[in-house]
Amino acid sequence: MSNPNKIILQESEIPYKWYNIQADLPNPTLPPLHPGTKQPIGPEDLAPIFPMELIKQEVSMEKWIEIPDEVRDIYKIWRPTPLYRAYNLEKLLDTPAKIYYKYEGVSPSGSHKTNTAVAQAYYNKKEGVKRIATETGAGQWGSALSFSCNHFGIELEVFMVKVSYHQKPYRKTLMNVWNAKVIPSPSDLTDSGRKILAQDPNSPGSLGIAISEAIERAAGDPDTKYALGSVLNHVSLHQTIIGEEAILQMEKSGDYPDVVIGCFGGGSNFSGLAFPFLRHKIVDKKNIRFIASEPASCPKLTKGELKYDFGDTIGLTPLIPMYTLGHSFVPAAIHAGGLRYHGAGALVSQLLKDKLVEAEALPQLECFEAGVTFARAEGILPAPESTHAIASVIRQANLAKTEGKSKTILFNLSGHGYLDLGAYEDYFAGKLENYHISDEELKKHLKELDAFPTID
Ligand SMILES: *Cc1c(COP(=O)(O)O)cnc(C)c1O
C-alpha cells in the first residue's frame, strides 16, 4: 500500500482559531428563554454561573474566534491528533468504502472533552474563579475538567451520575489523581438531589439530575462557577479544532469525505468534526452527508421533538430550543454513559430541522459488536459512546458493498475504552440488553413541555 496508515500534522499546524458555525447558519437558532418571563435571556442572567468570556462566545456571530496561546500550548500535549485510514477494518468488512477516523482518545483524559475543558478552565481562571462545580456521566467530562482545573489551580467538585459511579470506579480515581472531589448523584448535598431521592431512593441518576446539582452549587456560592461538557454553543465551538485539523489531514490524504459520522450525546464531538465540513456544505455547496449516531435507548434526534425545554431535570437552566425527550426522561442504564442525555444542543437541533444533518438510533448490542469488530481490526478499543459512530460506519460500509459503490467515510473516534473494560466484560458475559423507549412513555414526558412557548 502506498498510502499512509495515519496522517500526522506538525504542532505548528494546530489551528489558531475555532470556527463558529453561527456565522454561516442559513437559519439562526432561536434564543434561550428565561423560564419565568419566557423572554430571551441576556448575558447578566448567565453571569452568576459562567465567566463572561464564555457567555460572549455562546452568543457570538464572529466566524472565527482566536484560541488563546495558553490554551494552544496545553493542546500541544496531545494535539494535533492523528487521522487514520482504517485499512484493516475496510478489509475485514470487504467494503469498497474508504474509512478514515480522527482519533481523540490520545488526550490525557482519553476523549475529545479535554479540548473544551482546557478552554473553559482557562477563561474561569482569567476571571478569578476559585472553584467549579460540574456533572459527569461516564466520567469522561469529569476527568477532562479535573485535568484542566488541576493545571490552572482551580478547585473542582464533580457530581457523577450514580450508575456510572458504580460502573466505572477507575474514572473516579483518575479524577482524584487530578485533585477533584467526586460525589455520586443524586446526592443529599443539594435540594435538587434530595428532591429526586425522596421520589426514588434508588434513582440511578442521569446527566439531567447531576446538572441540576452542580448548577445549584454554583448559583449558591459567589466563588463557584459551573461548567458543562456538551450541549452549549461554546462547547461545540471549542471542539471545532477536531474538524479544522481533519480538513488539513484529508487534504493530505488526497480524499474528501462523502459521509461524516459522530456519536451523539449532547452534540459536542459530532459538532467538532462536522461543523468545519458543514461550512464546506453551506458556503461552498459541497455534497456531504452528516450522520449523528445516538443510542436507541435515548433517541432525542430520531424520536424526540423540537421544543423549548430545560437543559437539566429540575428546571434550573434557561429554556433551550432543542430536540428533546423531556427533561424528566431518565434513560436506561446503558454503558455509553456520555450519551444518556435527554436533549440536543440548539445548533445541531437547528441543523437537523433544516435537514443539513441526519440522525440514526442504534441498539446497544449492535454498538458493542461494532466496537469489538473495530478493536480486532484496528487495535484501539473504543469508548462505549464511540461504538455508536462505528456501528453507523459499518452500516454505511455494508451499504457501499451492496450498492457496489466506493465512498469515503470519515468518523470521529471520540475516546478510548480502556477505563470501560467492565462494560466489555458485561457484553462478553451476555449481560447487556437492547433498550427501546415506548411511544407512550415518550408522550408522557413530552406532555410536560406543552406549557412552554412552541416552536414551528
Ligand atoms: C461525552 C462523550 C460523548 C458524548 O458527548 P457529545 O457532547 O455528544 O460528544 C461521546 N464520546 C465520548 C468518548 C464522550 O466522552
Image: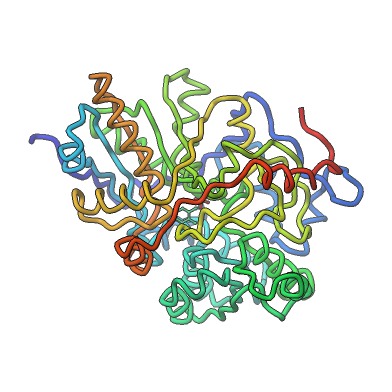
Question: At which x and y percent is residue 155?
Answer: 59, 78
Which residue occupies 81% across, 45% down? 33
Q: Is residue 418 left or right of residue 234?
A: left
| Residue 381 appearing in the image | yes
Which residue occupies 52% across, 39% down? 19
Q: Is residue 403 left or right of residue 272?
A: left
Q: Quadrant of the N terminus?
A: top left
Question: At which x and y percent is residue 372?
Answer: 27, 53
* Figure quadrant of residue 300: top right
Q: Is residue 337 left or right of residue 54?
A: left
Q: Residue furthest right?
A: 37
Question: At which x and y percent is residue 269?
Answer: 47, 48
Above or below: residue 409 compared with residue 369? above
Q: Quadrant of the C terminus?
A: top right
- Foreground residue among 137 and 203: 203
| Residue 66 appearing in the image | no
Which residue occupies 72% across, 74% down? 197
Image label count:
0
Above or below: residue 240 compared with residue 428? above
Q: How is the protein colored in the picture?
A: rainbow
Which residue occupies 42% across, 19% down? 287
Question: At which x and y percent is residue 213?
Answer: 70, 70
